[in-house]
Image (spheres, rainbow, N blue to C red):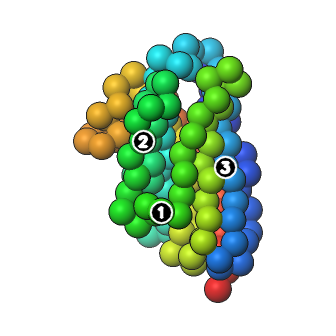
Amino acid sequence: QVQLVESGGGLVQAGGSLRLACTASAFTFRAYAMGWFRQAPGKERAFVAAINGNGGSTTYADSVKDRFTISRDNAKNTVYLQMNSLKPEDTAVYYCAADRTYVVFLSTKNCNYWGQGTQVTVSS
């Protein structure tokens, strides 16, 4: 059974940092692009960042560019999201996702697999 398990969320003050992790199981991790989405209260789920299977290509939403970094460790079946200079508007539930096709993260966003989400709250 495919699982994506997120960790690392929590409460942080504005300007602080958090690192999210998402560990995958039951599929060939290196063959999948991975990414992060977020959903704030009352808003639709939004793309945050994506990384291709070998880690050579990354894409970021404009709102997080130069503050967030996505990376992956294929030996550990884990993708990370390093979040720096956090702002109150970054408060959301963050979801990890996996798809065979990188472009899905930039288009339909209808990924094959999803995690349960982890809450990130940034206080002002």
Q: Is residue 82 left or right of residue 11?
A: left
Q: Which residue is mark 3?
A: 20
* Amino acid type at image mark 3: Leu
Instruction: Look at 67% across and 43% down and name the residue there.
Output: 21
Q: Position of residue 109 (x, y in %)?
A: 34, 41
Q: Which residue is mark 1?
A: 66
User: How busy is the neighbourhood of tag 1: few (under 14 within 10 Å), some, or many (20 plus)?
Assistant: few
Observer-nearest residue: 36 or 81? 81
As displayed, is residue 25 above or below residue 36? above
Observer-nearest residue: 56 or 26? 56
Q: Position of residue 66 (x, y in %)?
A: 47, 62
Q: Is residue 58 left or right of residue 4?
A: left
Q: Earlier in the sequence, mark 2 or mark 1?
A: 2
Q: Which residue is mark 2?
A: 58
Q: Position of residue 19 (x, y in %)?
A: 69, 53
Q: How many marks?
A: 3
